[in-house]
Image (cartoon, rainbow, N blue to C red):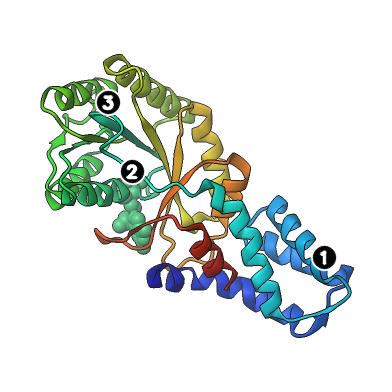
């Protein structure tokens, strides 16, 4: 977990330098608790998690002298309690054949990169994987899926720019069935003229895939950029409205001071967390480990 630990260092440094400034051997009174709660909110953990963390400390240590080390340990416990029930590593290519996975999220969040990393891991483990360049609005997006297809050794279904994405997804899933693919990874558009258009497009893709297999898509993974902080919450809200989001992957947790937002998203929407992105390379995706994440964040 060295990538995560070093990556989240900036999040935790920001958090713990603030904590240390307040708590170098100090009595845990109401004022101190209030300051701590503010620090946690500023670290994007969200008000409910910040309240739980301070409540735990108040219960255990009120009116006693505490060190920042004790605060960090207690904080890690609270964060771990929040995240542990949502820890759900992806296990693809077994439950259904083909297993259909949709990747949703705003442009630049790391959707295509994440799809590529997962494709590579799956082909390496012997799975037959089909990629679908479902952002049919941007030539660069189609090109990027193709690059990842080559890297991962997986064929790519694509269409000319402007083609109907739902039609493409339908044909791809149909091909995957006929040709015995284990997993289909579908990239989607992250920006259209309006939010409504984007969500309509997603709903249509989901509906059309469901015509080939009523249980599909089996997963709709929301990819969130770890560097946008609390904005991740409103992004999650928007995509949840379109329906069908089954889990989350947060990217770019290497070197951001905003990783705390994952706690807020988890807390608010109780979405399973599958993995985290810790770099641009093919191996820079880690299964989500709640305890490791909580410890790295708490410092
Ligand atoms: P998309 O528009 O959602 O498909 O996003 P992309 O997959 O194109 O990613 C946008 C940018 O973020 C690219 O430059 C990626 O290399 C980069 N990126 C994606 N995931 C990570 C990550 O975990 N860490 C870092 N540092 N960069 C990432």
Residue 44 visible: no
What residue is shown with label 2? Answer: 91
- The local crowd at label 2, few if under 14, some if 14 to 19, many if 20 or more residues have their Cα within 10 Å, is few
Per the image, label 2 sits on a secondary structure element best described as: loop
Residue located at (62% from left, 43% from top): 268
Q: For residue 136, which quarter of the picture?
A: top left
Q: Which of marks 3 and 2 is in front?
A: 2
Task: Report if the beta carbon of the residue with label 2 is closer than 8 angstroms to ligand 1.
Answer: no
Left or right placement of residue 66 versus residue 196 in this view: right
Residue located at (31% from left, 61% from top): 284
The image's mark for residue 165 is 3
Q: Mark 3 vs mark 2: which is more N-terminal?
A: 2
Left or right placement of residue 104 versus residue 196 in this view: left
Residue located at (85% from left, 77% from top): 64
Residue located at (62% from left, 71% from top): 15
Q: Mark 1 vs mark 2: which is more N-terminal?
A: 1
The answer to whether mark 3 and mark 2 are in CB contact below 8 A is no
The image's mark for residue 58 is 1
Per the image, label 3 sits on a secondary structure element best described as: helix
> Cα distance, mark 3 to mark 2?
26 Å
Q: In which quarter of the image is ligand 1?
A: bottom left
């Amino acid at each position: 977990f060295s990538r995560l630990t070093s990556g989240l260092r900036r999040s935790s440094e920001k958090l713990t330098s603030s904590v240390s400034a307040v708590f170098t051997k100090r009595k845990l009174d109401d004022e101190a608790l209030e300051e701590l709660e503010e620090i946690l909110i500023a670290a994007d953990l969200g008000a409910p998690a910040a309240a739980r963390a301070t409540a735990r400390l108040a219960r255990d240590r009120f009116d006693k002298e505490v060190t920042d080390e004790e605060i960090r340990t207690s904080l890690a416990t609270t964060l771990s309690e929040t995240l542990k029930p949502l820890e759900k590593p992806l296990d693809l290519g077994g439950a259904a054949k083909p297993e259909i996975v949709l990747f949703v999220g705003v442009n630049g969040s790391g959707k295509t990169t994440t799809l590529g990393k997962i494709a590579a891991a799956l082909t390496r483990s012997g799975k037959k994987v089909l990629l679908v360049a479902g952002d049919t609005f941007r030539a660069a997006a189609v090109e990027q899926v193709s690059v990842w297809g080559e890297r991962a050794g997986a064929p790519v279904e694509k269409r000319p720019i402007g083609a109907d994405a739902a039609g493409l997804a339908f044909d791809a899933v149909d091909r995957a069935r006929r040709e015995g693919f284990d997993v289909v990874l579908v990239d989607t558009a992250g920006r259209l003229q309006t939010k409504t258009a984007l969500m309509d497009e997603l709903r249509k893709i989901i509906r059309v895939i469901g015509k080939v297999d009523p249980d599909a898509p089996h997963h709709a993974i929301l990819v969130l950029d770890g560097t946008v902080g609390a904005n991740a919450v409103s992004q999650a809200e928007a995509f949840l409205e379109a329906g069908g989001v089954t889990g989350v992957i947060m990217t770019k947790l290497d070197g951001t001071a905003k990783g705390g937002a994952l706690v807020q998203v988890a807390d608010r929407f109780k979405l399973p967390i599958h993995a985290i992105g810790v770099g641009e390379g093919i191996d820079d995706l880690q299964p989500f480990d709640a305890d490791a994440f909580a410890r790295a964040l708490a410092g």
